[in-house]
Image (cartoon, helix red, strand yellow):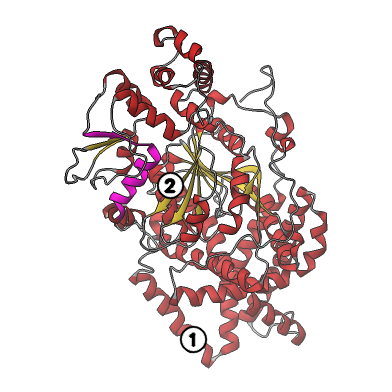
Amino acid sequence: MVRMAGADEAGQLSDASLPLPIELAFLTRHGVAANALVATAERARRLGVEPARELVASGIVAETAFYRALACELGLPFHDAPLPLLPGGEHGAILRAGVAPVVAMPGSPLRFALAPTGAALRSLLEGGPRRRDDIAVTTPRHFAASLREANAASLARRLAGLDKPGLARQTARTGSSRGQKLAAALCIGPGAYAATLAPFETFSLLALLAGPVFLAVAGLRLAAALEPPATDLWQRFGWRIDEVRLPIYTVAVPLLREEAVLPQLISALSALDYPAAKLEILLLVEAGDHGTRRALAACDLPPSFSVLVVPPGGPRTKPRALNLALAEARGALFAVYDAEDQPDPQQLRQAAARFLRAPATIACLQARLTIDNARDGLLPALFALEYAGLFEVLNPGLLRFHLPILLGGTSNHFRTEALRAVGGWDAWNVTEDADIGVRLVRAGHRIADLPSLTWEEAPLTLPAWLKQRSRWIKGHVQTLICHLRDPLALLHEAGPAASATFLALALGSVVTALGYPVFALAAIIAWQSGALLMPGGPIDGWASAIALMVMLAGAVAILVPPALGVWRRGEYRLLAFLPLLPLYYGLVSVAAWLALLEYTTRRHDWNKTAHGLARSSTRIGLTDAAAIRPPLPPAAARY
């Protein structure tokens, strides 16, 4: 959209008389109202952003119209389509420079494509090339798409970690090491042989070995439950950061067959209360996902939205797509959302304020996830109970102790510099969230809690739930194997407390899920036979003592965090489902055994969860004006 100036208005004002930067002043000669440009320049100054970016982001002039006027001003041809660029060069550097050589075409004098921004745009207007036919101007969107197309093969290798730097990192691509396979064989072989000779004694010995793992998991859950919740200063005092201090924020949303939720997603992201010129929303879609690409092409996206087509290649995973967003991100902060997410409109502001107040060692914030469709049935209700315990109790409690957590796959907020320093995501890990959290901790960073809600959709059917949960547990196995290839290096880099917490969370979640039904059944049989309270030997005695502790601590650890979590959220209706949680964790065990099978047969396959099937909602509409807190008066408290 372009607001055209009247004949008198455009004629009476000259470039010299306008208090305008050069990247806006030239537009008066191309029909844009001078008063709109003056207001834009003032807003850009107040926000601390590039004037041209504020002009386009505010919708006063469309990106295509701006660069068409720029080409006309310079006397250069304008191309409103991707151009065939020469491959090569560093992807991010070329994007920032906004200039690249064009493939020579017969009969065409064209040699370079330009899509300047910032300082490059000012320099071009001040003394750049004029009236030449070998340089063409295009839009930054077309320029970025052309660059991805020209370097598709090399970019695909980079995103998958198959380039030289990627191959030098420890990833889930290669699976377990030779030493890990040997250790597993030495444990499984003799264990299986002993089980055939003395099954009950072998089981008692396994109970002795596994008992501490169960107790560690229960201990962490109970310790986190005892930690009181931190005061939410944002909600209590309504503090709001000055917009000039807000950094540029990149939001990445990977999409795969998400046509059903696109309207909801665009509405939720459009409701984010953040200056448009400082917000970059990247929708990542696979090259072969023609349905989502057609649906996106039919959408009228706001200027802050960009669609990035991920170059074809494997593995086709969420972390691989996120690596493309990281390569092109211009934000100092980086957030990840899933396609069905509906974050609180204030979440980016809260995260930015938290990062500005926090030490540089805090590289990641985990927002709190809550289930939106808990009324859709028994399974979503139990899922909501589990999430309440995890995101209201366990995660905040551990983070207040400065201990790491296993990140959720969405509503993660990062310092972009820290992400790039650790090499981005492992494209071969199907729980890239857990893995990237461990990598950040090993690099000396910390994770912190962000008390802001994001509403999510829980699977409605048991098969869909099992597919999702088995992928999560398979990813935890991948993360364990990857980071335990060199246990001493993990201990040295992360430290004893963080390493022990990682093992308790990741290894504990896998071992407890696998062993839950076996040990529960054995405990019931031992209780009925009297062997639990009257053991027959020293090993049986120790096993019985540990079994009793695990039973008591485990029961409390299963029930207390979810009950406390829903109480803190005020979702008291869910308390009625608490007695069913032991059965729910029996389903988690089924998913764990499926994950173990999948790890041996389909290690890197991504079990896609279908979205847009929810029948109910418990949240307040995020697009209502009442959902977005208005700015406070200047005298209010500020960060």
> Closer to the N terminus: mark 2 or mark 1?
1
- For residue 130, side relative to residue 175 (left or right): left
Residue 540, image x and y in percent?
A: 64, 81
Badge 1 element: helix
Q: Check disc 2 and report the residue beneath it.
A: 325
The span shown in magenta is 134-152
Residue lying at 68% horizontally and 17% vertically, measured from the top left: 635
Judged from this view, the residue extending furthest toward the bottom is 197
Closer to us: 12 or 265:
12
| Circles 2 and 1: CB atoms closer than 8 Å | no
Numbered label attached to residue 610: none
Residue lying at 77% horizontally and 57% vertically, measured from the top left: 563
- For residue 221, side relative to residue 476 (left or right): right
Residue 443, image x and y in percent?
A: 42, 46
Is-magenta flag for residue 484? Answer: no
Numbered label attached to residue 192: 1
Closer to us: 183 or 316:
316
Q: Is residue 335 visible?
A: yes
Q: Quarter-wise, where is residue 135 in the image?
A: top left
Residue lying at 31% horizontally and 22% vertically, measured from the top left: 123
Instruction: Determine whether 398 is above or below 603 in the image.
Output: above
Residue lying at 60% horizontally and 55% vertically, measured from the top left: 261
Three-letter amino acid code at the position of disc 2: Ala
Three-letter amino acid code at the position of disc 1: Ala
- For residue 354, side relative to residue 8 (left or right): right
Numbered marks: total:
2
Judged from this view, the residue extending furthest toward the front is 7
Is-magenta flag for residue 145? Answer: yes
Badge 2 element: helix
